[in-house]
Image: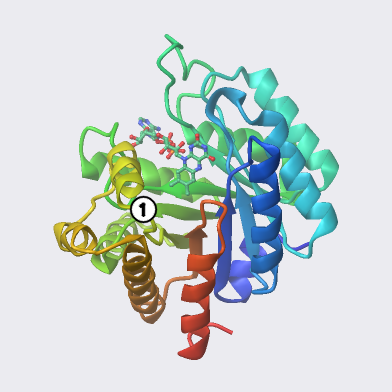
Amino acid sequence: MPRIDTLLARGRTTSFEFFPPKTPAGDATLRRTLADLEELAPSFVSITYGAGGSTRERTHDLVVDILEHTSIPPMAHLTTVSHTRDEVAGILKRYRDAGVENVMALRGDAPADDPDPFHAFPHAVDLVELTREICGEQTSVGVAAHPEGHPDAPDLATDRRHLAAKLAVADFAVTQFFFETEVYLRMLDDLAALGCETPVIPGVMPVTNVRQIQRFAELSGAAFPTWLADRLHAAGDEDEVRRIGVEVATQLCVELLDAGAPGLHFYTLNRSTATRQIHHRLVEDGLLE
Ligand SMILES: Cc1cc2nc3c(=O)[nH]c(=O)nc-3n(C[C@H](O)[C@H](O)[C@H](O)COP(=O)(O)OP(=O)(O)OC[C@H]3O[C@@H](n4cnc5c(N)ncnc54)[C@H](O)[C@@H]3O)c2cc1C
């Protein structure tokens, strides 16, 4: 299966993100979602990793299962927080030996119960280097980008410099979700000014639940703009929230594609409906195949 950097060099990608389910019911939902979304012929799918190894086996097994039983190239997320170097090296070797060709190298967030969570790998860039060392040419390495700045950074300019340094050794990035095209374009301008031209795929989150998005935005440092919050709070019921969520995300995708984004990465939360509706509209408008 092709590496993601090869796919990006060929043209625009579409991709979907999933998390490893914890229960048999969650697993059944994900299987249905995967089958639904496989019909859209995504360029790749990505599977998240629970910080500290809380989903270590489930992420691994799902990635390998997708590799072996579907036509979609999988990307394994890996966070270094609370792991030793040996543990991380062991996880990377298993992916390499299973034939997995795409890894997203992440630092992760500090858990409350670990006094020294980043001892082995202070930053994600350290994992990019270890992945290159262990997986070599077999593996394309992606990283995370935070268009509105990472919440731990002292200021945006410092965060951009660290991001540019990370992108200089990675193959591509996927962004945290955001709701306004300018946020993404400003980040690209800042990166270009720092001499960075590595592809950055925008991450798109269709809103299906207002409280959930508010929580995600608080955790990740993403803005939840007032115009969107007002529209969603005025919605009569959940169906209207979903309708607005799909409409807003579709408009964002149209603008991002017009602006030349190298692909679209959808945060699915393991459901297919909103992503399918957006994809369908973009195909109808001739923006996706
Ligand atoms: C697309 C995407 C996917 C994600 N998937 C997961 C997942 O599967 N599991 C999960 O737990 N979390 C995931 N996250 C969340 C991510 O782990 C957190 O945002 C985390 O806080 C930062 O991770 P990072 O890889 O961006 O870290 P880093 O790139 O290390 O950045 C973290 C902070 O360190 C600073 N920094 C970076 N390099 C340096 C340096 N050399 N010197 C000084 N400071 C530096 C940065 O400015 C930033 O403030 C994801 C995020 C995104 C955007």
Q: Nearer the viewer, residue 226 or 97?
A: 226
Q: Nearer the viewer, residue 63 or 188?
A: 63
x and y, in percent, of residue 71 in the image: 78, 65
Q: How many marks?
A: 1
Task: Examine the rendering and report whether any part of residue 96 can be seen.
Answer: yes
Image quadrant, ligand 1:
top left
x and y, in percent, of residue 39 in the image: 69, 73
| Rendered position, 55 above or below 275 | above
Task: Examine the rendering and report whether any part of residue 286 can be seen.
Answer: no
Horizontal side of 29 relative to 186 (left or right) equals right
Q: Nearer the viewer, residue 61 or 245?
A: 245
Q: Which residue position holds label 1?
A: 209
x and y, in percent, of residue 93 in the image: 77, 33
Determine the secondary structure under disc 1: loop
Residue type for callout 1: Asn
| Rendered position, 251 above or below 109 | below
| Rendered position, 91 above or below 194 | above
Horizontal side of 56 relative to 227 (left or right) equals right
Residue placed at 56% from the left, 69% from the top? 14
**Quadrant location of residue 50?**
top right
